[in-house]
Image: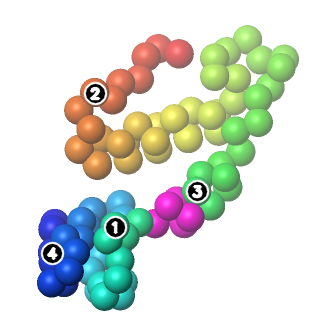
Amino acid sequence: MIKTDGQFDIIYHPLLVSPEECEMSSVKYVTRCVELFLEYVKIDTQSNEDSDTFPSTAGQLVLLQRLHDELKALGLADVTKDEF
């Protein structure tokens, strides 16, 4: 959704923030980058050097799937996952 505050066009997306969640007076693009980053780092993606699988842990697959889904939700068309 694009809204204007008279000075800037502001782009909103469900993965970002809603118009109600921000002060529109001086913000050009409103994101939840810090919040998303903090959610990503909560996922245990440490590799397992003894594993015979790729990725070597389930947590790596969780992060992969989340990033894939979020990029698709943002409207990116060329997002794919291979068989690892």
Location of residue 55 with respect to 46 vertically, above or below: above
Q: How far apart are marks 3 and 4 (CA)?
A: 26 Å
The residue lying toward the viewer, choosing from 38 and 5, is 5
Q: Distance between the residues labelled 2 and 1?
A: 23 Å
The stretch in magenta equals 32-36
Q: How far apart are marks 1 and 3 (CA)?
A: 17 Å
- Report which residue position mark 3 lands on: 37
Q: Which of marks 2 and 3 is nearer the N terminus?
A: 3
Q: Quadrant of residue 5?
A: bottom left
Q: Report x, y in % for residue 37.
A: 58, 56
Label 1 vs label 3, nearer the camera: 1
Numbered badge on residue 3: 4
Q: How far apart are marks 2 and 3 (CA)?
A: 22 Å
Left/right placement of residue 56 relative to residue 8 reads right
Numbered badge on residue 78: 2
Q: Which residue is drawn at 76% across and 29% down?
A: 47
Q: Report x, y in % for residue 24.
A: 30, 85
Residue type pointed to by label 2 = Asp
Which residue is most to the front? Answer: 7
